[in-house]
Image (cartoon, coloured by chain):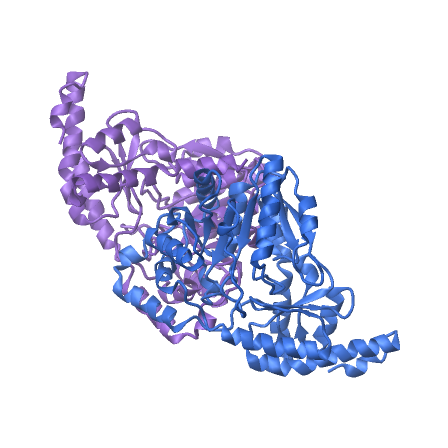
Chain colours: A blue, B purple
């Protein structure tokens, strides 16, 4: 009688949240510091002090009627234009604030884009491993997810496969760089190649194919890679951004959708975005945080903390002989499992109190995601467990049946 | 190629916003104080000082990682339980925080309920005049709006019509009290009668019919009417609430969905709500405002200011001979037009710089909505225009063709 699909989605929840809930329970059983919860991508570094200061200043110094009033549904004019100006300065782009639509975070930005652009059974190509909610959001908009396996050694898109997989029904390709769950970055050359394929296919099918870049981790980069801002490379590009990770404000729900300056039928697409936002009851992004943003552009939380975490964890895992994709950005490490089935491996890791997300959650098998947005202390304390996990499999392999492996149990 | 329905919804926008945009333009032409913009329901009274103080205290005194972190998708535990406790104390109900789901405002709350409960072509009964976005939200969830005309003298539901209109496809009935756009309140007796009809029909069709109470104006009541809290009267009831109006925080997007304690298959319905919120990319309500709420329960902005506005406006309009529904709550006045077509009447009113929303926006003809959440000064300054509008129609009537009426023009 009620909507059974929604009941199912609500009941099953997310595998990541489930693992994190298990972690909370387990901590109560054996103590907070004895469980190594690497499940959730919740920033562990505080927001910059300037965010706290500016929030207080805005609240103190703005007429509360104006401050807390409804904003335009597409967002505060000054904020949209400040964002465009900042991006143009940073990436040499030619964007206009007129085609920015403020959203409560990236999840809503993605949802609004899917509802604005997809018609029933339109195909959206994603590269596995991918953020699992893409599927939930796309299917809610009656689109179809076409997941393409990546190159298992680099976790980067397989371009031949991409070329083969684009059909007349392909409406959109999603990229996510720095990537959740792998931490890899799509370099300029790769973006150029993807653009070239899409341009060719647009011509072949005489239709628009949107390249949607989901980039909440854009500022979380630990090398001096040049970030290729997609509107500079591909005309039909759409950026979905969130300040959740760069400013450590995930709970506050603030981000935006941005249309490339050369997007085909930009006005129509922007209207469809406004229509989707309106129809889905989004009303607007939170006003206070919209007013905060102009003072925080180009500012980030102290990401050197994540870099240090990454280095400690990555170096140790490599030393132990694990195979790990080198994470250049975001705060995730993607590690090959020591058996084929990632769920089984994740369950074995639990014996050593390591909570690692099995990669089937992200659409491929054989890996686990390790979120290193946790305290350095926890990482250091967890290292012996990674060692025991390795030993467990070594013994299991030697014994061929694993009956001796229990000796390694914590 | 893109979603044409969404493009249309985005392009047409809301008639109310359109009128308000006209007002902004007009103000630039003839001066801020010479346009009497009664179009928008944006609170004009500041939030309570305690809200400002508590916001600053929370920001200053909470670990920023904890404060701005993702909350549970259904909301902060303490906030949900504080709300239930407050409601139980105020209305003698027996609600549990376990069945509260925090939302970014009422629009999202409504949307989430529609997607959670409706299957394709399910019918939702609304009483005209009604908040126009109901239709946008319900149709996006593939439901059908069944709008029932009210009694034109009281603007209250026609119960005989309700009884006749419930079918096997009726999934839900929406009430909105204090009402937007009329300001009327549904008294206890009316709620009892609606409940009785729904109970009878549930039995007749052997199916659940939900009574959804959209009540963002619950605290904006200017008489000593007892507010009948629906979970006390009808088992299958759902409350959608927003703090937008009571605390003057419409831009901040904070509210909730609440399931009645005796709701049938409560667990399933709550799961469907979680599923809808998740599928629509809602993630959670803004964290900072979730943490604010427990300190603000039972607190409201200074609503005596609205009451004073109402009295000045209502008394003067009645004195002039207009027919106005007596507004006991919210901040809207619903006035009979002086000609049949409410759009034409609204256009004539513009000649006198009065921006009044034509009632066809709300699903019936013959009225205009006057939002008196404006400054007292504006109301006083606007009164001569209401007088001129009346005179215009008086002369038009006498002349039978209206050619002399232009004399009254400003």
Tell me if residue B253 comes above or below residue B124 in the rendering.
below
Q: How many marks?
A: 0
Residue B306 place in picture, x, y as percent: 24, 50
- Decide if residue B199 is in sight here: no
Q: Residue at x 16, y 43 (%)?
A: B31
Q: Quadrant of the N terminus of chain A?
A: top right
Toward the viewer: B271 or B328? B271
Residue B172 place in picture, x, y as percent: 51, 41
Residue B409 place in picture, x, y as percent: 14, 28
Q: Residue at x 26, y 28 (%)?
A: B345
Task: Indicate left or right for A151 with B393 as reference.
Answer: right
Toward the viewer: A347 or A128? A128
- Decide if residue B131 is in sight here: yes
Q: Residue at x 51, y 52 (%)?
A: A230
Toward the viewer: A286 or B86? A286
Residue B344 place in picture, x, y as percent: 28, 26
Tell me if residue A12 comes above or below residue B145 in the rendering.
below
Q: Residue at x 43, y 32 (%)?
A: B148
Tell me where residue A86 sits by quadrant: bottom left
């Amino acid at each position: 009688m009620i909507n059974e699909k929604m009941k199912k989605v609500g009941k099953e929840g997310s595998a990541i949240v489930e693992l994190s809930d298990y972690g909370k329970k387990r901590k109560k059983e054996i103590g907070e510091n004895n469980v190594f919860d690497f499940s959730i991508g919740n920033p562990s570094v505080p927001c910059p002090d300037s965010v706290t200061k500016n929030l207080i200043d805005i609240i103190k110094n703005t007429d509360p009627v104006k401050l807390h009033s409804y904003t335009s549904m597409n967002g505060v004019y000054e904020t949209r234009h400040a964002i465009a100006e900042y991006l143009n300065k940073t990436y040499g782009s030619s964007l206009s604030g007129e085609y920015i639509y403020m959203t409560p975070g990236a999840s809503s930005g993605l949802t609004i884009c899917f509802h604005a652009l997809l018609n029933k059974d339109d195909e959206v190509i994603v590269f596995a491993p991918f953020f699992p909610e893409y599927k939930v959001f796309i299917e809610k908009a009656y689109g179809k997810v076409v997941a393409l396996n990546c190159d298992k050694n680099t976790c980067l898109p397989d371009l031949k496969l991409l070329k083969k997989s684009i059909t007349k029904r392909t409406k959109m390709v999603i990229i996510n760089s720095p990537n959740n769950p792998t931490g890899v970055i799509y370099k300029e050359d790769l973006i150029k190649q993807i653009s070239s394929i899409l341009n060719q296919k647009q011509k072949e099918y005489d239709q628009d194919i949107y390249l949607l870049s989901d980039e909440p981790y854009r500022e979380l980069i630990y090398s001096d890679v040049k970030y290729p801002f997609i509107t500079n490379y591909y005309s039909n590009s759409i950026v979905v951004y969130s300040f959740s990770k760069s400013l450590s404000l995930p709970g506050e729900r603030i981000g935006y959708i941005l249309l490339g300056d050369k997007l085909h039928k930009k006005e129509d697409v922007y209207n469809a975005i406004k229509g989707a936002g309106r129809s889905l009851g989004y009303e607007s992004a939170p006003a206070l945080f919209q007013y905060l943003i102009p003072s925080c552009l180009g500012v980030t939380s102290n990401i050197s903390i994540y870099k240090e975490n990454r280095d400690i964890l990555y170096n140790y895992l490599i030393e132990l002989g694990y195979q790990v994709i080198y994470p250049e950005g975001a705060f995730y490490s993607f590690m090959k499992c020591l058996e084929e089935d990632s769920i089984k491996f994740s369950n074995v890791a639990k014996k050593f109190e390591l909570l690692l997300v099995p990669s089937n959650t992200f659409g491929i098998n054989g890996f686990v995601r390790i979120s290193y947005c946790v305290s350095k202390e926890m990482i250091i304390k967890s290292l012996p467990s990674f060692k025991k996990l390795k030993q467990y499999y070594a013994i299991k392999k030697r014994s061929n049946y694993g009956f001796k492996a229990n000796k390694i149990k914590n």
